[in-house]
């Protein structure tokens, strides 16, 4: 049940962010739900591999390269999802930062109520 709530929170936040950011687009809320599922799968499978390969750069940049890895995950999700369009790397970076911040905030508010 907790997984479903987190997926819905991610989908809602992603859909609302596309209304604010002109460089990221969904064809509808269904596309945002598909995005949250694909993002969860990519974070489970691809992100650890990219994190290990990018560990030297992450250490050199004091962790800032992790933001680049998050943006790459968003771009990979864009590649797999037809109902999502990201206009470039910088929009993916901004979208990933805002998505991480807002979903963390909302998930912490939801988990405090339990």
Image (cartoon, grey):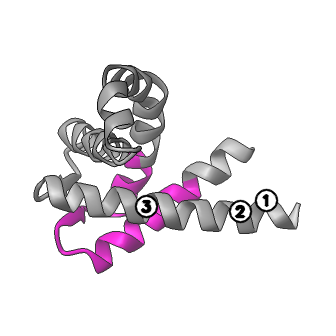
Rendering quarter of residue 43: top left
Which circle's residue, 3 or 1, is located before the other in the chain?
3
> In which image quadrant can residue 38 be found?
top left
Q: Which residue lies most toward the left here?
A: 87
Residue 21 among magenta residues: yes
Q: Is residue 24 left or right of residue 59?
A: left
Q: Where residue 32 sits in the image (x, y, percent)?
A: 38, 56
Q: CA distance from mark 2 to mark 1?
A: 5 Å
Q: Position of residue 64 (x, y in %)?
A: 35, 48
In the rendered image, residue 63, in percent from the top left (x then y), is placed at: 41, 44
Above-or-below relation of 93 to 105 = above
Left or right: 79 in relation to 35: left
Q: Which quarter of the image is occupied by the N terminus?
A: top right
Query: Which label number is shown at residue 47?
Result: none
Q: Which residue is mark 3?
A: 99
Report the magenta residues as a range. Answer: 8-35
Q: Are marks 2 and 1 in contact (CB under 8 Å)?
A: yes
Residue hosting label 2:
108
Q: Which residue is mark 1?
A: 111
Please tell me in which quadrant of the rendered image residue 15 appears: bottom left
Question: Which residue reaches farthest bottom?
Answer: 20
Q: Quadrant of the C terminus?
A: bottom right
Residue found 66% across the figure and 42% down from its top: 3
């Amino acid at each position: 049940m907790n997984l479903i709530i987190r997926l819905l929170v991610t989908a809602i936040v992603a859909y609302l962010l596309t209304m604010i950011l002109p460089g990221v687009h969904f064809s509808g809320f269904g596309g945002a739900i598909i995005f949250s599922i694909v993002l969860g799968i990519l974070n489970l499978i691809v992100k650890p591999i990219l994190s290990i390969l990018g560990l030297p750069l992450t250490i050199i940049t004091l962790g800032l390269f992790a933001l680049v890895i998050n943006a790459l995950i968003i771009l990979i999700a864009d590649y797999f999802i037809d109902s999502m369009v990201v206009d470039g790397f910088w929009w993916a970076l901004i979208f990933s930062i805002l998505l991480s911040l807002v979903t963390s905030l909302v998930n912490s508010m939801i988990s405090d109520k339990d």
